[in-house]
Image (cartoon, rainbow, N blue to C red):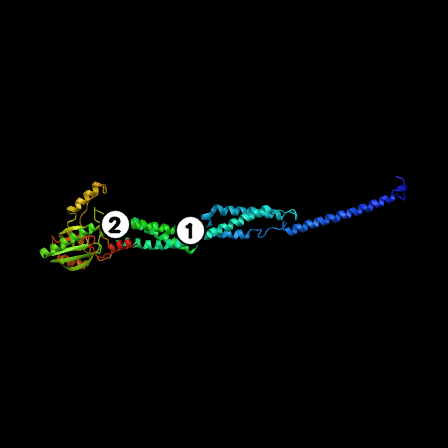
């Protein structure tokens, strides 16, 4: 190119103008870009879109969910608690992802949506759980009070009824359930306390029902009439003969001595281990009920338990009852009716331990032995209709 173009040639001045214009334009564009980026940065800063939302780690939701778990929330809202925890994990992942991005390119929308859902669910779960706990606490307190009362009643019934393994097992389960309910209650686990108390109530009820079946006849007017009639016959026999008759009241564990129609002595006696029932067969360890006679007087060395008065068990009524039970299929063909029921010594232990016999202590037995004779009438009854422990337990059940 000729030097003229650069050294004073006709294009020199236009090129200078073009350069100046280009410089000015670039400056303006640069200023405009800086202004735009500055405005954008200010806008992003002011609208907070580049900053994580409050509690971006989800500590509040985490605390509520943890408290819900400790308060038994998994028993009631397991699916909802896990869903909220999943939302919280997703929210934290998205938060970390956005925090690692360049400023100005962050978008916390998705993370915020998960976090809001987790926090909202955690709050709802806690509110519902709190309301449930208030209600369940009252129910558990009431159930524990009922369980305690029912257990006391069942134990009172056991004290006057048959000592069978089923009743003992149910009472043991009821006691354990009550202890667990009280422990759960102390630990604030009201749902578990309520369930344990209900289990205790159910087991006490089963024990009470079985015991009630054994003692219901003590409140039956027909049985009471029959027992009073046996007592009357025994007393009348002593009055008519001027001799001695015995009356054994199983409910009160006493043997009464009548002479010429007047009671002259009453002694405490131990009975069969299942004395609350009517004797039905050999081995049931039950003291029989009915009108009997003394058939033999045994001195020391003739009986296993010191002196003894042998009774004529089984009598005709005992045999009829035994055969009827066999016909109903209640007894096997190999079951025997039993015998060897005595009034004998070695008693006074304060518990029912014999195989069906009547056992005063040795001092009282010696006195009875002197007063009795072969043929002496002995009435053995469940109750005389008075205020005994079995009938008291029945009245308590009616009041409740």
**SS under mark 1:** helix
Position of 124 compared to 311: left or right? right
Residue occupying the far top of the picture: 1
Which one is nearer the viewer's eye here, 17 or 141? 17
| Residue at image mark 2 | 214
Residue plotted at (74% across, 48% down)? 32
The quarter in which the N terminus is drawn is top right
Which one is nearer the viewer's eye here, 10 or 265? 10
Q: Quadrant of residue 305?
A: bottom left
Question: In this view of the protein, can residue 346 be seen by the observer?
Answer: no
Position of 244 compared to 138: left or right? left
Residue plotted at (82% across, 47% down)? 20
x, y (%) of residue 135?
A: 42, 53
| Residue at image mark 1 | 191
Position of 236 compared to 199: left or right? left
x, y (%) of residue 36?
A: 71, 48
CA gap between label 2 and label 1 equals 35 Å
For disc 2, the neighbor class at 10 Å (few under 14, some 14 to 19, many from 20) is: some
Depicted 129 relative to depicted 4: above or below: below
């Amino acid at each position: 190119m000729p030097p003229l173009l650069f050294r004073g040639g006709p294009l020199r001045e236009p090129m200078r103008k073009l350069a100046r214009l280009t410089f000015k334009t670039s400056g303006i564009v640069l200023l405009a870009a800086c202004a735009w980026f500055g405005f954008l940065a200010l806008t992003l800063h002011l609208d907070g879109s580049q900053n994580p939302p409050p509690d971006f780690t989800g500590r509040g939701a985490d605390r509520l969910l943890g408290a819900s778990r400790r308060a038994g929330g998994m028993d009631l809202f397991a699916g909802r608690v896990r869903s909220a925890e999943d939302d919280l994990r997703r929210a934290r992942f998205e938060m970390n992802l956005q925090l690692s991005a360049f400023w100005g390119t962050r978008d916390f929308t998705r993370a915020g949506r998960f976090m809001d859902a987790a926090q909202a669910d955690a709050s709802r779960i806690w509110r519902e759980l709190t309301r449930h706990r208030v209600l369940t606490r009252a129910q558990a307190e009431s159930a524990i009070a009922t369980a305690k009362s029912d257990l006391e009643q069942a134990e009172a019934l056991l004290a006057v009824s048959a000592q069978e393994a089923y009743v003992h097992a149910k009472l043991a389960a009821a006691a354990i359930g009550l202890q667990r309910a009280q422990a759960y209650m102390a630990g604030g686990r009201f749902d578990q306390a309520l369930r344990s108390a209900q289990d205790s109530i159910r087991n006490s009820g089963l024990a009470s029902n079985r015991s009630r079946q054994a003692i219901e006849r003590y409140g039956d007017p027909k049985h009471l009439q029959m027992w009073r009639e046996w007592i009357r016959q025994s007393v009348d026999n002593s009055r008519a003969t001027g001799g001695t008759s015995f009356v054994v009241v199983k409910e009160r564990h006493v043997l009464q001595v009548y002479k010429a129609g007047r009671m002259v002595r009453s002694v405490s006696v131990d009975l069969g281990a299942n004395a609350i029932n009517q004797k039905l067969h050999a081995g049931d360890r039950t003291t029989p009920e009915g009108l009997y006679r003394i058939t033999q007087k045994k001195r020391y060395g003739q009986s296993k338990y010191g002196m003894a008065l042998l009774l004529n068990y089984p009598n005709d009524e005992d045999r009829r009852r035994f055969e009827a039970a066999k016909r109903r299929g209640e007894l096997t063909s190999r079951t025997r009716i039993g015998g060897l029921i005595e009034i004998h010594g070695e008693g006074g232990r304060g518990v029912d331990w014999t195989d069906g016999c009547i056992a005063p202590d040795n001092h009282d037995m010696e006195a009875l032995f002197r007063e009795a004779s072969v043929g002496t009438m002995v009435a053995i009854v469940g109750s005389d209709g008075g205020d005994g422990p079995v009938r008291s337990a029945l009245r308590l059940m009616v009041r409740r």
